[in-house]
Image: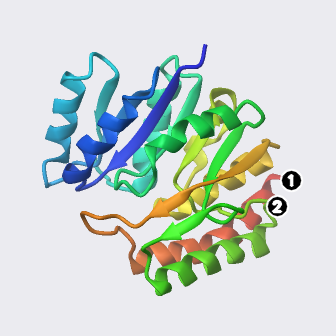
Amino acid sequence: MTRPLVIIPTYNERQNLAPLVTTLLDIPAVRVLIVDDRSPDGTGVEADRLAAASGGRVSVLHHEPPRGFGRSYIDGMRAALASDATHILQMDADLSHDPADVPRLLAACEQADMVIGSRYVRGGELRNWPARRILLSAFANRYVRAITRMPVLDCTTGFRCWRRELLARMPLDAIVSDGYAFLVELTWEAHLAGARMLEVPIVFVERRKGASKMSGRIIAESAILPWMLIARSRRRT
């Protein structure tokens, strides 16, 4: 029996959380783990309210400092692996990922160890993004592929589905990046582990509420990381 668990990291997403979680709970058997990074806007309080009303299908992890996107995900993944979940999904909290795509990712996981909700395979789309963001994202993915030679068109997407067995083999303690580079690093580790990775098209819609978490520090980390990954893999051999 498939027991999917969706991990949603949050920081100042109070306005978006209820619509997202409500829609996810319309999908049979799906459970939700919200990892709140001590949001000052009351996201954690909203998460607790949703959990209390969910009949046990929603749980909340109030993440302790130091804060960070990657750190929140790692703690959420550890909690997921401590549960009985058979499939573990990653998903943004800002409504840029469509919950209706969750069943498609789960179905595709019958033929793969990790399924990537991809903006860059045929049928994928970026919607309502400014041209600068589109160019930055496209360049980032080509840059990562050129250095790492990973056979993945969308290395930076935050919409994924893992088979439990693969995620349990990932060296979570060794992950060093924290921003969106975290997504690249985890994809790299799955690639090194010989994972069967499959990309399915998604439509990514720019957030309607709240502010983007993109920053200069995140961009710099993402530029340096692929070289660090190559160097680290050489040290292992």
Return the residue at label 1: 237
Q: Locate residue 96: give its quadrant.
A: bottom left
User: Which residue is nearer to you in this view: 69 or 131?
Assistant: 131
Instruction: Point out residue 227 in the picture as x, y percentages from the top left corner.
Output: 70, 72
Instruction: From the image, tell me which residue sits under label 2.
Output: 234
Quarter of the image with the N terminus is: top right
**Farthest residue, direction bottom:** 132
In the structure shown, which secondary structural element does the residue marked by tag 2 occupy? helix
Give the alpha-carbon distance from disc 2 to disc 1, as whole Å. Answer: 5 Å
Residue 95 can be seen in this image? yes
Q: Residue at x 17, y 39 (%)?
A: 46
Packing grade of label 1 (10 A; few <14, some 14-19, many >=20) is few
Q: Residue furthest right?
A: 237
Q: Position of residue 153 (x, y in %)?
A: 72, 64
Contact, mark 2 vs mark 1 (Cβ under 8 Å) = yes
In the rendered image, is residue 177 in sight? no
Within-10-Å neighbours for mark 2: few <14, some 14–19, many 20+ = few
Q: Position of residue 141 (x, y in %)?
A: 66, 72
Q: Which mark identifies residue 16?
A: none
Q: Quadrant of residue 112?
A: top right
Q: Is residue 135 above or below residue 160?
A: below
Q: Is residue 191 left or right of residue 154?
A: right
The answer to whether residue 204 is left or right of residue 42 is right
Task: Please state if 11 lies on the left or on the right of 114 as rendered.
Answer: left
Of the residues shown, which amino acid type is indicated by label 2?
Arg
Task: Establish if 53 lies above or below 195.
Answer: above
Which of the pair 236/150 is nearer the observer? 150
Residue at horizontal 69%, vertical 71%? Answer: 144
